[in-house]
Amino acid sequence: MGNMVSCEEAIREVLENIPEFTIARKPVLDSLHYVLAENIISNDNIPVNDNSAMDGYAIILSDLAGADKTCPVTLKKSNYDIPAGEFTRFEAKKGFCIKIMTGAPVPRGCDCIVKKEDVEAREDKILFFKEHKYFENIRPQGEDIKKGETVFAKGRIIDPAVVGVLASLGIKDISVYNPPIIGIISTGNELADINDELFFGMVRDSNSYSLAAQVKESGASYIRYGIVRDNRFDLKEAVKKSIGECDLILISGGVSVGDYDYIKEILKESGAQEIFWGVKQKPGKPLAFYKSGDKLIFGLPGNPVSVMVCFELYVRPLIRKMMGYQELFRKAVIAKALGPFKHEAGRTEFVRVKIKKDEYGNYFAAVTGEQGSGILTSMAQADGIAQIDENKKEIIKGESLKVYLIKNDL
């Protein structure tokens, strides 16, 4: 098989061979789920001035000394109001109050806003029935963000709230880590396309579709090169084209040791460097990883489950690292086995499992059914992928398992 490695060695090699990050400028509205490649520093105070947190009345706090229900303080209402968004030069005066709206700038000299629900209006006089606190119901200048402050550091994932803050700072576009373009090639004479009728000995190409969906879910973009037949010329042309157009290439099939598995020869002829060929795992043993200049190439097995499992274990973490993410791997939990898990020592095994979670937060794992690497429904039914280490023997009921969660609602 060649340069076979353990799972731990394989993921280390994959993540150590990452190419240089590429950075792009994106409009804020197009940046969701990208990762910041720069620090965001505010040029403004947010809010830009003291403003009212309530609809009410702007006052000088000392005017309300001694106010209570039995002896309210009466202040004269000024003959102007302050709506939101209006620049005001008005000043608070002793014995007067000014009607003010939420978000409106606080007049100079005012040190308290009283809610309109806490007063009684009588023509041009306003009655106040209790004392209040200094700066009550006033949002001070820079309360949210101060000018010169680093609001978001490089490496921050952009979520909807971040988009809103960036807009409040007047930032129209930002630098983000550019997602890689992933090339997807399916190989095999036995493959039929999605619209083709199935004849004896044929199978429909599911690999390029599941891989495209996994790439999309990871946040990257893809180019599908369709089905490439098992002949040297077509394979060589497809590999050459994908290396020219993509950052990372995923080739499913053609990496075993059959008479028509030409990928290894073609990659060698193209000058690509073999990092490893074969991983001590099940499913996905015939997994290959190559480097061609600053381009990376995975030779994935042909079996549909093996393809998806290898993507989860190796390709997805690589894509996330290339996109600037700090969290590269799926969330892992410890789950109790609800039944025995058969396993032969010698290879790390990854088992598709359904997960249950009890009211105390404990996880339980059950096999999804037959675990053959061609049974794609075992992935569709799975909530997670359980890892059984290579030196471990059969897992018994109640034993603890490490499970990578592949569904976001757990």
Image: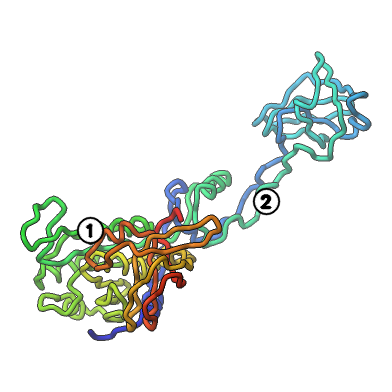
Occupied quadrant, residue 393: bottom left
* Image side of residue 27 versus residue 342, left or right: right
Earlier in the chain: of badge 1 and badge 2, it is: 2
Between 211 and 156, the one lying in front of the other is 211
Q: Position of residue 235 (x, y in %)?
A: 14, 69
- Residue at left offset 44%, top offset 48%: 27
* Image side of residue 59 versus residue 347, left or right: right
- Residue at left offset 80%, top offset 13%: 123
Q: Is residue 176 above or below residue 399?
A: above
Q: Secondary structure at mark 1?
A: strand
Occupied quadrant, residue 271: bottom left
Can residue 178 be seen here? The reply is no
Q: Which mark is residue 182?
A: none
Question: Which one is in front in this view, the residue at disc 1 or the one at disc 2?
Answer: 1
- Residue at left offset 26%, top offset 63%: 183
Q: Position of residue 150 (x, y in %)?
A: 62, 57
Q: Secondary structure at mark 2?
A: loop
Amino acid, disc 1: Arg
Amino acid, disc 2: Lys
Q: Residues within 10 Å of mark 2 (few under 14, many from 20)?
A: some
Q: Which residue is mark 1?
A: 224
* Image side of residue 243 versus residue 64, left or right: left
Occupied quadrant, residue 284: bottom left
Q: Which mark is residue 146?
A: 2
* Image side of residue 46 versus residue 236, left or right: right
Q: Position of residue 53 (x, y in %)?
A: 71, 36
